[in-house]
Amino acid sequence: MNRISKLMRNHHKYLAGANNNKVVALVMSSAIATEQAFSIYYLSECAVTLEFGQSINLQLLDAVSAYNQLLHQQPFHGFNTAIPAYTTLTVLFDPVVVSQADLSGATCFDKVSNYLQRLNQHQKELKETTATRIAIPVCYGSDYGPDLQEVADLHRLSIEEVIEIHSQAVYKVYMIGFVPGFAYLGGLDERLETPRKSSPRKKVPAGSVGIAGMQTGIYPMQTPGGWQLIGRTPVKLFDVNRAQPSLLKAGDEIMFTPITEKEFIDFNVDLNVFNRF
């Protein structure tokens, strides 16, 4: 079985709901969760934000991801969802339900804050967290990556060297934002650090892989954007018809697999056939 067939097979398993909802290609890694101090501040009558620190690094990402997992495993009465970011976790709740819940505190803010602090003290109960490593196929250059040559020239590298450097790294999803399903990835090799374009494009095709500063990312849908575009993936990053609409989530690990233009086209053709069933 060739490379693209393997990617397609695993992607089809994901779309069909198999393989424990892990996607495209994966391995598992684990990390021991430990208690991590955070501050809590009021965001609105139905939300609070937990700040774990102010610098962007893997330790804080792991802390945010571990606590997010713990909160979803042991939610308080009235909890709706939590939104992880680089150094914070925003907790959304129903104030009517929380006000009537058997939680310590005079106000909704007090009740939620007290619960979250107590939960943090029991984080040792979460023995390990898992990160999904996902292989994303990318066709680099030409019309798929119109800025690849510019990036290569800027760093005095060949196109082949840029592709090699970009596809050899393991990236971490720090947060989902900007538009639904847009993953901000940390872990870019400093040799590829590239500023955004001085004039953003009005339309960036869905699946475009770009670089901005020390980050790389994938546009899940057609939007305006100012990142340097070096390639494109045929994988659909966001689909409202999936049980988990966003293919990626904070804490996932990403690797890019270079593919040819023919493989890109074949991937799309196979998906169109598959999606008819």
Image (cartoon, rainbow, N blue to C red):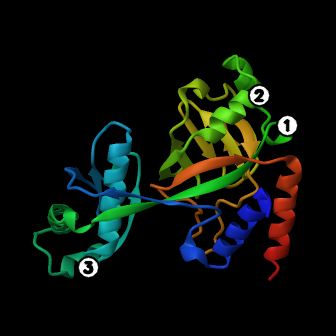
**Which mark is first along the chain, 2 or 3?**
3
The residue located at (67%, 74%) in the rendering is 13
Of the image marks 3 and 1, the number of the one nearer the N terminus: 3
Q: Is residue 182 above or below residue 57?
A: below
> Which three-letter amino acid code belongs to the residue tagged 2?
Ile
- Seen at 67% across and 79% down, the residue is 16
Q: Position of residue 38 (x, y in %)?
A: 22, 50
Quadrant of the rendered structure where residue 150 is? top right
Q: Please name the residue shown 29% across and 57% down the image.
A: 32
Q: Residues within 10 Å of mark 2 (few under 14, many from 20)?
A: some
Callout 2: SS: helix
The circle on residue 159 is 2
Q: Nearer the viewer, residue 10 or 272?
A: 10
Task: Give x and y (percent) for residue 106.
Answer: 10, 69
Identify the residue position indicated by label 3 in the image.
77
The relative height of residue 257 versus residue 142 in the rendered view (above or below) is: below
Residue that mark 1 sits on: 142
Marks 3/2: CA–CA distance = 54 Å
